[in-house]
Amino acid sequence: MKEELERALLVMPPQVRKAFDKAVESLKPVVADIEKSVPGTKNHYGIYMSMLSEAKGRSRTNLAFALLLAGANEKGVVTALKLVNGIPLT
């Protein structure tokens, strides 16, 4: 997943990258609070699912990437993204 993120960042236009980096920075304190809290669901996927469900389409994917870059638990975000998108967990 990290390699995919790095590739996506490389092809972003500079203005988009600047906005994305700003979003990541603003999410860092939120993610830090989530990650240090007692998990209500495995890897905090429930909280990440509620955040991701507010976004649609490509915005949802971008939010997931931003959460990961902000330090979110990868398994929690991936699980949440699958569930929000109706993809069965295997």
Image (spheres, rainbow, N blue to C red):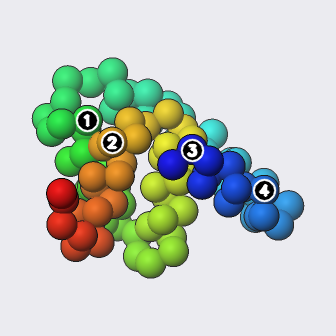
Q: Residue at x 27, y 52 (%)?
A: 79
* Callout 3 touching callout 2 (CB < 8 Å): no
Amino acid type, callout 4? Leu
| Image: 43 above or below 11 | above
Q: Earlier in the sequence, mark 2 or mark 1?
A: 1
Amino acid type, callout 3? Lys
Whole-percent x and y of residue 35? 35, 28
Cα–Cα gap, marks 1 and 4: 28 Å
Amino acid type, callout 1? Asn
Q: Residue at x 78, y 56 (%)?
A: 10
Q: Which residue is mark 4?
A: 10
Q: Which residue is mark 2?
A: 75
Q: Is 41 on the left-hand or right-hand side of 27? A: left
Whole-percent x and y of residue 68? 49, 43
Label drawn at residue 43: 1
Whole-percent x and y of residue 64? 46, 55
Mark 1 or mark 3, whichever is nearer to me: 3
Q: Earlier in the sequence, mark 3 or mark 2?
A: 3
Q: Earlier in the sequence, mark 1 or mark 4?
A: 4
The kind of secondary structure element at disc 1 is helix
Classify 10 Å Cα crowding around label 2: few (below 14), some (14-19), many (20 and above).
some
Q: Earlier in the sequence, mark 4 or mark 3?
A: 3
Q: Residue at x 22, y 73 (%)?
A: 86
Q: Which residue is mark 3?
A: 2
